Image (tube, helix red, strand yellow):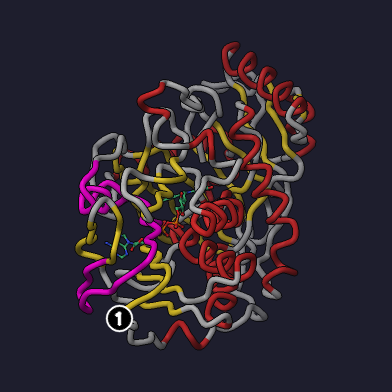
């Protein structure tokens, strides 16, 4: 475990992040929320539908929400066909995104291990591997010896509290540099003429005869033909402004990084039972995520005991981390749906669209949902991959229940 000096060579922040346009008084499409999903939606509205009379309204600074706070795990090995459909679609887009954006996003397909620590974990993991293969998603089941080969620093001794009994492995999974992803998408939208408006909070949604007509903001009213919500963590608040409720709960979700270290961790390891997931960022920090804080909140911070348990779990799995120092911790706000699957599509209000409920796992979907959502907005009809994720499923009962199915949900 050797400390590392920060390296040079990464691109500077693009200029446009430091300037913000005065919004016009009317747009064809207003996107609420300038995180990864809002920026990806703007990028694909311009790129695939020629729709550029668009404003992305962000109440803080661009990508300062969950997009800046997530642990960047990208994978598509979910259980159900519907989930595999949208996440695998996203993973394929990730594989070409650096070229598409002409921007270095440092997408690194270093593989993801989901460890199994009990007979139930093993059964769930083997079942998921089989389901993934049937859906065309790359997946393998590894025994503890093979886990050790992929990630030599995992403690596979049978004597620990939660011994490693095996793992699912998706070799094409990995990580990307989230701020670069946001800047790449924002740069593309900006170049297409889309207004990226920072410090602009949507405080009301105007609806007339069942159709959206615009939004109210701290910078004044803005008329809009269509309004697309991308406000992770606050989706229920915005839906309420338009007069309907969402089946979502907002929770803090925390993560932390160590000091910069020389490369020691070659892959991504997730463990549901001990509830920690770990990778090593390009710069060298060990990146560790926790489970959600149990209480509901809109604050971007959680309780210390969650971090404490997470560190205990990490040390058990990776004794070598005992010598690492904590650099910083932070929290984001995620909105979680009853079946732990997203909600993407139309709403009871004409011209108002919904993209929310990604919970702890929406970073990996960023290009996929951006493309699917842009298509939904442009055609006023759900994209085929979004159909299973409609709001109606909570009244029809056609749930996509990934809750108990997808190991750790990130
Ligand atoms: C600690 C942590 C770890 C995570 N790890 C992973 C992971 O490893 N892999 C993974 O796939 N996912 C992960 N996630 C989840 C992922 O980050 C989110 O699902 C995803 O980022 C949500 O989409 P977004 O990027 O658009 O959200 P955000 O970046 O949060 O964007 C929403 C934006 O809406 C803005 N907004 C809200 N209300 C208003 C308003 N009224 N007016 C204007 N703007 C508004 C917010 O300021 C915010 O910038 C993690 C999340 C956290 C917090």
Nearest the viewer among 88 and 246 is 246
Magenta residues span: 215-244
Q: Would residue 22 be found to the left or right of residue 401 on screen?
A: left
Nearest the viewer among 49 and 368 is 49
Q: Inspect the magenta stretch and tell me whether residue 14 lies in it.
A: no
Q: Would residue 181 be found to the left or right of residue 102 on screen?
A: left
Give above or below for 34 relative to 168. Answer: below
Figure quarter occupied by ligand 1: bottom left
Residue sitting farthest toward the front: 209
Q: Which residue lies at the image location 26% right of the left edge and 53% below the top edge?
A: 238
Give above or below for 220 relative to 141. Answer: below
SS at circle 1: loop
Q: Which residue lies at the image location 53% right of the left edge and 37% below the top edge?
A: 387
Figure quadrant of residue 58: bottom left
Q: Where is residue 38 in the image (x, y as percent from the top left)?
A: 46, 62
Does the beta carbon at disc 1 come under 8 Å from ligand 1?
no
Residue 353 in view here: yes
Label 1 packing within 10 angstroms: few (<14), some (14-19), many (20+): few
Q: Report the residue marked by disc 1.
A: 25
Residue 286 in view here: no
Q: Inspect the magenta stretch and tell me whether residue 241 lies in it.
A: yes
Q: In which quarter of the image is the N terminus?
A: bottom right
Q: Which residue lies at the image location 68% right of the left edge and 56% below the top edge?
A: 94
Figure quadrant of residue 358: top left
Q: Which residue lies at the image location 52% right of the left edge and 52% below the top edge?
A: 376
């Amino acid at each position: 475990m050797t400390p590392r000096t920060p390296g040079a060579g990464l691109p500077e922040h693009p200029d446009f992040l430091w300037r913000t346009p005065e919004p016009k008084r009317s747009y064809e499409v207003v996107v609420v929320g300038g995180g990864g999903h809002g920026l990806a939606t703007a990028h694909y509205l311009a790129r695939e539908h020629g729709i550029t009379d668009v404003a992305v309204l962000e109440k803080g600074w661009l990508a300062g929400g969950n997009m800046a706070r997530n642990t960047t795990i990208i994978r598509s090995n979910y259980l159900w066909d519907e989930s595999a459909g949208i996440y695998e679609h996203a993973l394929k887009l990730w594989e070409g995104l650096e070229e598409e954006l002409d921007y270095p996003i440092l997408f690194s397909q270093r593989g993801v291990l989901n460890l199994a620590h009990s007979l139930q974990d093993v059964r769930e993991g083997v079942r998921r591997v089989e389901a993934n293969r049937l859906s065309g998603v790359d997946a393998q089941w590894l025994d503890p010896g093979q886990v050790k080969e992929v990630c030599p620093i995992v403690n596979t001794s049978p004597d620990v509290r939660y011994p490693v009994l095996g793992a699912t492995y998706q070799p094409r999974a990995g990580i990307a540099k989230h701020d670069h992803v946001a800047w790449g998408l924002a740069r593309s939208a900006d170049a297409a003429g889309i207004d990226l408006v920072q410090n602009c909070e949507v405080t009301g949604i105007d609806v007339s005869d069942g159709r959206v007509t615009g939004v109210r903001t701290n910078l004044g009213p803005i008329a809009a033909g269509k309004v697309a919500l991308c406000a992770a963590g606050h989706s229920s608040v915005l839906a309420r402004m338009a007069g309907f409720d969402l089946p979502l709960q907002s929770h803090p979700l925390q993560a932390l990084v160590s000091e910069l270290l020389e490369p020691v961790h070659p892959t991504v390891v997730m463990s549901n039972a001990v509830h920690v997931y770990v990778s090593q960022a390009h710069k060298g920090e060990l990146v560790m995520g926790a489970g959600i804080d149990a209480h509901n909140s809109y604050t971007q911070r959680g309780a210390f005991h969650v971090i404490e348990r997470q560190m205990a779990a990490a040390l058990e799995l990776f004794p070598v981390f005992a010598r690492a120092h904590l650099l910083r911790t932070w929290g984001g706000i995620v909105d979680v749906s009853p079946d732990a699957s997203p909600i993407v599509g139309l709403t009871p209000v004409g011209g108002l669209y919904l993209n929310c409920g990604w919970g702890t796992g929406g970073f990996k979907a960023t290009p996929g949902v951006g493309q699917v959502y842009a298509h939904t907005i442009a055609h006023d009809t759900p994209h085929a991959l979004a159909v299973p994720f409609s709001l109606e499923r909570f009244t029809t009962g056609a749930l996509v229940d990934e809750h108990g199915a997808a190991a750790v949900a990130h």
